[in-house]
Image (cartoon, rainbow, N blue to C red):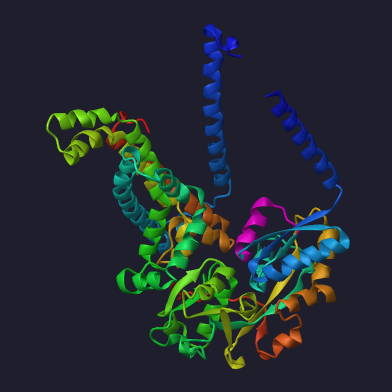
């Protein structure tokens, strides 16, 4: 009993002391939409190695991350999956709009199972009878909102809606729909192929059918406790080194490269679900 | 150390200690609810409450949870009885296996189910028998998977507490084994049956992880109340999320009160 108590006290001291030394290093917290999860983890590790500033990354849906910042009134950086959420964050007055930076670009694509077994080549193919289509939930997941926008823009919303069998609750869950062969096709981001090259193939949508492409924005929140470190991390993400990490994971990092996929598409902005939209 | 708790003074200390624990816990929950009230916008609240989407979610949650609880109880009664009474080789292993769903997080169970329906056998079931993936039966299957273990655990302790001698006596008086079970053991287990039925139902209403993974988060199709909360937070709509949380709390409180009223104060749950 006594030994146990001694052991416990020892452990407590250890924890307390190690806590003291850790307090010296700077830390920041970023709320990140999961569309940029793989490169963001690597970038945060590289940034810590270089500057000694530890970045805690919280991943989730872009909207869920915004809710967490809003409710906790904390967090240094907000990095959602698309600019729509920067506009929402602006309306809620939780970010400093002067700090917004464009980190990488995302092209909406049709993602299909490896080898394209159902031979889906175009948006019109998604309306074919017997094709099971999945999208992200358009009210909560940015890639789902883009899906509805694209269907709507090409007057295919009613036809494809008949084939939509599921709405996924997050961006990576949308990709998983294909990885697990749960559906035949989804509207996803071009990087989904790089996330899971063995299972996910992408079919690019012709430029005239793409109304808008997305970018991953980053902004410093109004609740930041260490604006300097937050700015440093944001600068790192758009620096050559940070951009190389994103490129390694298949992300497009320059606007001109993104424009190649859709020269006339709008970059960023906001899309409202049509009021006639019925889930 | 129990010396100080002797005598009437000790009794008072004990009483105060237990009651203040109760009061603190109650305050904790009341505090949480009040803090949500502070965040509530009443017009958003009312419009969210009576929106088609939320009314659908309420109906879906209540019906799926009720079906799931009935199925789970029908499975759990014989299973719990078998574990409680029968002795067979490897019983410990089977017993621990049945506890797994309590320990494993629901999202893992949902993923496991989704992967199961991806293999040839699962796909055949899904395509030719009942469509589970991304459909309402999937919600029920996910809920049953999660709550079954809970029902079994609760019922096992109920059956454990019933002396097998009652059954033996019934049999010496001419009952067959099934007769003894249905006319002696089951009525004796009524309290436990009611309690575990309520708890499993309540757990099914609140189930989220397995449900959303297997059935998806499609509005007006597979959107249960917890999914609605998750989606509202996901679209950064905190007011709507709070409205749905209150709906969930309301349903839970009403259901528990009604059930208690029906079965009377005799059953202490």
Percent across and percent down for residue B61 are 39, 56
Q: How many discs mark residues in the rendered view?
A: 0
* Residue A217: in magenta span: no
The C terminus of chain B lies in quadrant: top left
Viewer-proximal residue among B191 and B34 = B191
Q: Quadrant of residue B85?
A: top left
**Residue A272 in sight:** no
Q: Quadrant of residue B175?
A: top left
Taking the image as shown, residue B22 lies to the left or right of residue A260, namely left
Relative height, residue A185 to residue A38 (above, below): below
Q: Residue reaching furthest top?
A: B7
User: Is the magenta region chiefly helix, strand or loop?
Assistant: helix
Percent across and percent down for residue B194 are 31, 39
Q: Identify which residue is drawn at 22% across, 32% down.
A: B167
* Residue A75: in magenta span: yes
Q: Which residues are magenta?
A: A62-76
Percent across and percent down for residue B195 are 35, 38
Q: Residue reaching furthest left?
A: B174
Q: Identify which residue is drawn at 19% across, 28% down.
A: B169
The N terminus of chain B lies in quadrant: top right
Relative height, residue B47 to residue B95 (above, below): below
**Residue A100 in sight:** yes
Q: Identify which residue is drawn at 66% across, 77% down.
A: A269
């Amino acid at each position: 009993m006594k030994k146990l108590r001694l052991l416990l006290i020892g452990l407590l001291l250890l924890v307390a002391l190690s806590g003291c030394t850790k307090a010296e290093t700077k830390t920041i917290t970023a709320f990140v939409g999961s569309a940029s999860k793989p490169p963001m983890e690597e970038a945060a590790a590289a940034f810590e190695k270089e500057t000694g500033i530890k970045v805690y990354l919280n991943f989730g849906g872009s909207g869920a991350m915004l809710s967490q910042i809003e409710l906790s009134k904390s967090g240094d950086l907000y990095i959602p999956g698309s600019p729509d959420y920067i506009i929402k964050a602006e309306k809620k007055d939780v970010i400093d709009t002067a700090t917004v930076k464009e980190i990488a670009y995302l092209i909406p694509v049709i993602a299909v199972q490896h080898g394209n077994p159902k031979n889906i080549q175009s948006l019109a193919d998604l309306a074919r009878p017997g094709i099971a289509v999945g999208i992200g939930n358009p009210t909560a997941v940015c890639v789902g909102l883009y899906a509805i926008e694209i269907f709507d823009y090409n007057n295919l919303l009613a036809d494809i809606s008949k084939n939509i069998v599921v709405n996924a609750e997050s961006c990576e869950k949308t990709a998983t729909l294909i990885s697990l062969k749960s559906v035949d096709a989804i509207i996803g981001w071009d990087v989904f192929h790089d996330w899971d090259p063995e299972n996910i193939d992408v079919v690019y949508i012709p430029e005239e059918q793409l109304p808008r492409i997305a970018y991953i924005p980053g902004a410093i929140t109004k609740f930041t406790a260490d604006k300097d470190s937050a700015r440093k991390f944001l600068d790192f993400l758009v620096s050559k080194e940070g951009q190389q990490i994103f490129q390694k994971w298949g992300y497009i990092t320059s606007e001109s490269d993104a424009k190649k996929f859709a020269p006339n598409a709008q970059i960023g902005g906001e899309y409202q679900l049509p009021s006639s939209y019925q889930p | 150390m129990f010396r100080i708790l002797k005598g009437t003074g000790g009794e008072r200390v004990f009483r105060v200690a237990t009651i203040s624990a109760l009061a603190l816990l109650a305050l904790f929950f009341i505090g949480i609810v009040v803090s949500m009230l502070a965040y509530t916008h009443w017009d958003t609240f009312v419009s969210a409450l009576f929106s088609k989407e939320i009314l659908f979610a309420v109906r879906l949650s209540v019906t799926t949870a009720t079906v799931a609880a009935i199925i789970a109880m029908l499975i759990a009664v014989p299973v719990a009885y078998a574990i409680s009474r029968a002795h067979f080789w490897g019983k410990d292993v089977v017993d621990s296996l049945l506890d797994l769903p309590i320990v494993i997080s629901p999202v893992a169970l949902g993923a496991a189910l989704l992967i199961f329906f991806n293999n040839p056998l699962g796909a055949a079931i899904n395509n030719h028998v009942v469509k589970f993936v991304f459909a309402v039966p999937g919600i029920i299957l996910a809920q049953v998977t999660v709550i079954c273990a809970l029902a079994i655990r609760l019922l096992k302790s109920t059956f454990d507490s019933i002396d097998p001698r009652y059954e033996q006596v019934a049999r010496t008086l001419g009952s067959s084994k099934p007769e003894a079970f249905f006319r002696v053991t089951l009525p004796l287990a009524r309290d436990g049956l009611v309690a575990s039925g309520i708890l499993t139902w309540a757990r099914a209403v609140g189930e989220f992880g397995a449900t959303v993974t297997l059935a998806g988060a499609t509005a007006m199709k597979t959107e249960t109340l917890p999914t609605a909360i998750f989606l509202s937070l996901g679209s950064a709509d905190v007011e709507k999320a709070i409205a749905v949380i209150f709906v969930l709390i309301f349903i839970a409180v009403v259901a528990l009160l009604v059930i208690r009223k029906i079965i009377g104060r005799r059953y202490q749950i």
